[in-house]
Image: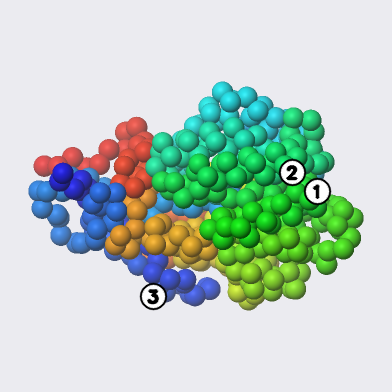
Amino acid sequence: ARPSRLALRGDLLDFTGPPAWGGLDDPAVRFRPDHWLLIEDGRVAGVQAEAPDASWTCEDHRGRLILPGFIDTHVHCPQLDVIASYGTELLDWLNTYTFPAERRYADPAVARAGAERFLDALLAHGTTSAMVFPTVHKVAAETLFEAGRARGMRLLTGKVLMDRHAPDGLRDDVEQARRDCEDLISRFHGQDRLGYAVTVRFAPTSTPAQLAMAGALCRQDASLYMQTHVAENRAEVEWVAKLFPEARSYLDVYDRVGLLHERAVLAHGIWLDAQDRAVVAERGAQVAFCPSSNLFLGSGLFDWVAAREAGFTVSLASDVGGGTSLSTQRTLGDAYKVQALAGRRLTAWAGLHAATLGAAQGLGLSHEIGHFGVGTLADVCIWDWACGPVAEARFAVARELHEKVFAWMTLSDERNLAAAYVAGVARYRRPGAAPVPPH
Ligand code: GUN
Ligand code: ZN
């Protein structure tokens, strides 16, 4: 069969490595204005300035920005139903809004519809890869894997482990949970673009026996991912200290059972101390910075500079429903403001890198996603530079590249998305955002 050949024209932006902190003119930024991205059989085949020959199906998006699909390293599928819930901090918020919403996912029909709606929403926000929390119910993980497979997405998830301090209908037990994990791993891990993440909700909702079981799963198979929450909220940190008096710190609860490794993603990490940060770096784990959630739930301000100095990867995450938007630009806008409060500044380069190549490298997936290197899978998003008169006026006076991209990062959101491709297949198109017709 003839290879499928698709060429997308626009302003291509990606990264060849980590940009320096604070530099506006950075050699790691690869901007190729008005170029063609060539996609053959779902993979990036090259980039060129000239129009490709007639063997290529051409989509002309000149005047639009083309980026690698965003990677959201921490987000909760069932919590779309409680996004924007008023008036609580973490522990209250879980009991008042989140746990009741998650209980409904015991119903396979609710779980399936929720998974499909959630992944379609990610794609409509320009997020093509994600590490996702479903619920404690096996069927919620199953339906999410199936929906991810149907969309061809890079999706990392796993059944949530929680066997205490949660209401009826939301608890498992060690043995059943182990069997469910093993079955899900055998059916989905490494299939298509799916990966299994051992998913400990957080230390308070697992018994020591369950944490040990989760650590054993990771030790048995080093290709498994791990996701959890750590040191998000001060009341939570105090509770963990009471529940695990033998541990040096909240992070240490996970370290003692072998949950910290190169494929571990720890959400938040606001209240880690210097020794914890050194441990995260030593284990090769990463922290998912969730600024929207941290501000909305009043959790605190993550110290990205201390993380950089400790030497671990920081990725960006929406943490919906604690976070209030699936938009990576909104998340980056909040990240900028959190840094600004600490007297620091986040460049568009550092922010966009963290949401693309940086996250891909942190997950060990940079051979597949996060940039436009030849051979990667073509997860590609096409964005309008400006939507509406305010943004248009701002772009009319922007001169430098960083100025323009920073204004885009700060002013844009999912309404700017024209199209999203997953492995070269269009999975989202905004009505009315057609390519320029050939003449
Ligand atoms: N800690 C334990 N569970 C959750 C959750 O669902 N959201 C957030 N933000 N933190 C958590
Ligand atoms: Zn979370």
Three-letter amino acid code of the residue under disc 1: Thr
**Looking at the rendering, which quadrant does residue 221 occupy?**
bottom right
Q: Mark 1 to mark 3: distance in Å?
A: 48 Å
Residue bearing the label numbered 3: 27
Viewer-side label of 1, 3:
1
Residue 303 lies left or right of residue 386; in this view the side is right
Where residue 145 appears, x then y in whole percent? Answer: 50, 39
Q: Quadrant of the N terminus?
A: top left
> Would you say the beta carbon of the disc 1 residue lies within 8 angstroms of ligand 1?
no
**What is the number of the mark on residue 207?**
1
Q: Nearer the viewer, residue 219 or 35?
A: 219
Instruction: Please report the residue visible at 86 percent of the width from the left and 57 percent of the height from the top.
Output: 244
- Crowd band around label 3 with a 10 angstrom C-alpha radius: few (<14), some (14–19), many (20+): few
**Looking at the rendering, which quadrant does residue 307 occupy?**
bottom right
Q: Mark 1 to mark 2: distance in Å?
A: 9 Å
> Would you say the beta carbon of the disc 3 residue lies within 8 angstroms of ligand 2?
no
Residue 45 lies left or right of residue 357; in this view the side is left
Q: Nearer the viewer, residue 433 or 260?
A: 260
